[in-house]
Image: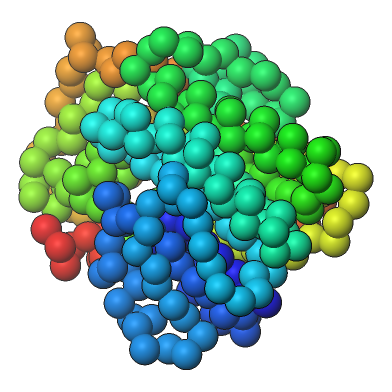
Amino acid sequence: MRILITGGAGFLGSHLADRMLAEGHSVVAMDNLITGSTDNIAHLAGRPDFRFVKHDVSNYIFIDGPIDAVMHFASPASPIDYLKFPIQTLKVGALGTHNALGVAKAKGARFLLASTSEIYGDPLVHPQTEDYAGNVSTTGPRGVYDEAKRFAEAMVMAYHRAHGVDTRIVRIFNTFGERMRLDDGRVVPNFVGQALRKEPLTVYGDGAQTRSFCYVSDLVDGIFRLLMLTPGDDSSNPVNIGNPTEMSILEFAQVVNELTGNPAGIIYRRQDRIAGDPQTRQPDITRARNLLGWEPRVALRDGLDRTIRYFASRV
């Protein structure tokens, strides 16, 4: 297969490119580099089965030759990024998804959308199943990302129903691993960066808010299985991919300090809980288990060990 990956120079996009190439496919990675980096794909330069195109997918996409699959991963994905680029985030969710779907329709290609657990907002149902409609603020600061992804899902389903495009939607829960940016504002790089600098880890609120952390190779495996799934009545419906093992942010901070040998401890900024920050986040992965035969295999501490070694070379 020849696969177009939008956001192909990003954290997840670059790992997907590696996996697709390892499976014998060829990859066209497209990215405008506002949050991605060519450092993430430098090891692929010069390969005949890999091509990088610098382009903003919110503008019309032209790709010569056949395309068998489009994987739409272009979007700022961390709060610090989508709050810095709110208009671009909305545009890539709307116009970018429209343009990427246009490529899939024109080429007769399969289409996979990278959606997010953020479409559930601050959930009132726990754990979150794919049929939960969410509890999301359209006007809050995080709405630019949440609503961009919700609109993107609606557009994907419209192309599936109206044009018969073979579509897939993956709802990605918290994922970590090599190639994350230290300054991207998410909890893993924040904590690991502070720990490696021997600084106290900053916990906002009381640390009781929960997350579930999936190592990147597990996530990529789930996405690969979803892309390759034989088309059927259920293949177009959203699928949660994430680790169902839930832990509090405080517990996670303690694990990071333990693994890094950081003696500085933890400081609380109880008055500074981030607006709209979900109190709970845990995927129900029953559909992924039944449909894909998938569940995460990498233990949190093993994945963190690898991630810490990666960040240690960059602090």
Q: Where's residue 246, x and y in %?
A: 52, 34
Residue drawn 79% across the image and 60% down it:
229
Q: On the image, which quarter does residue 249 sit in?
A: top left
On the rendered image, what quadrant is the C terminus found in? Answer: bottom left
Q: Where's residue 303, x and y in %?
A: 42, 59
Residue drawn 30% across the image and 77% down it:
42
Is residue 233 left or right of 241 when viewed as pictured?
A: right
Q: Where's residue 72, x and y in %?
A: 55, 52
Is residue 90 left or right of 106 when viewed as pictured?
A: left
Is residue 230 in view?
A: yes
Q: On the image, which quarter does residue 272 sit in?
A: top left
Viewer-nearest residue: 65 or 128: 65
Viewer-nearest residue: 116 or 98: 98
Q: Is residue 313 above or below residue 182?
A: below
Q: Where's residue 161, x and y in %?
A: 83, 38
Residue drawn 34% across the image and 64% down it:
54
